[in-house]
Amino acid sequence: MRLPRGRLRKSRVVSDPREPLADVLDRAVTGYAVFESQDSLLLDADGRGVVTFTDGVPVVAYHTGTGRGGPPALADLAVPGPYHVSVFELDADDLAPVHDVETLCVPPGMPAERLAGDPALADSTRRAAPAERTTAAAAEQDGDHSAVEAFLEDEAKIAAIREQARKEARQRAAEWGLNDT
């Protein structure tokens, strides 16, 4: 997926993707956000997640590392934070060719649910979506399954999450003196 470079609106590190998603919705941004997970920032892991917006409502998701779009791209991006997020404004005409690719499209509320785990933000996003996109709400339920399935099929991601949980558990045990015998 190739997008023209937009006008940088904001660039910062956040612990929760809810903040930039809510900000884009509140400001009705048309453009895109680039999400770089801590794996990309710290471990030189490949890939960034890109989510495009029209008037603050997500339209497309794509992961540059896996080359997957749509709900599977959100599953690829759904890793523990922090994230470096850059938000760019771009004319709707420049986004139109990408928004016409059905396999890249996501239901309006799915990024808020999958990345931020925020049902209230997802509902607000669905309400802000144009009428023609709200019919995707029923399809969103089907999309939920495909995103979960895509995530569960990614054994490397599951192994990385398990390893990170083990490291954190060892660190906490050491802090609490549970390793001392």
Image (spheres, helix red, strand yellow):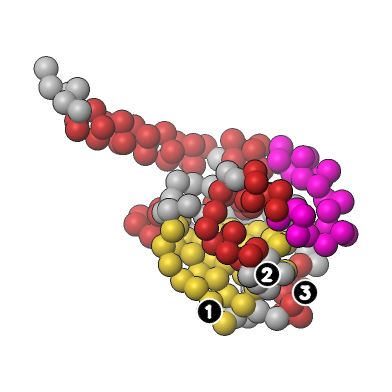
- In the structure shown, which secondary structural element does the residue marked by tag 2 occupy? loop
Q: CA distance from mark 2 to mark 1?
A: 15 Å
- Dot 2 or dot 1: first in sequence order is 1
Mark 3 → mark 2, Cα distance in angstroms: 17 Å
> Up-down: is 18 above or below 6?
above
| Quadrant assignment, res 172 | top left
Q: Which residue is mark 2?
A: 28
Position in image of residue 128 (x %, y %): 75, 60
Q: Which residue lies under the disc numbered 1?
A: 8
**Residue 131 found in image quarter:** bottom right
Q: Is residue 97 left or right of residue 14?
A: right
Of marks 1 and 3, the one in the foreground: 1
Who is closer to the viewer here, 31 or 48?
31
Q: Position of residue 50 (x, y in %)?
A: 59, 63
Residue 138 falls within the magenta-colored stretch: yes
| Mark 1 crowd level (few <14, some 14–19, many ≥20, 10 Å Cα) | some
Looking at the image, which is closer to me, 104 or 13? 13
**Percent position of residue 47, x then y:** 50, 60
- Quickly name the residue at label 3: 96
The magenta stretch is 125-145
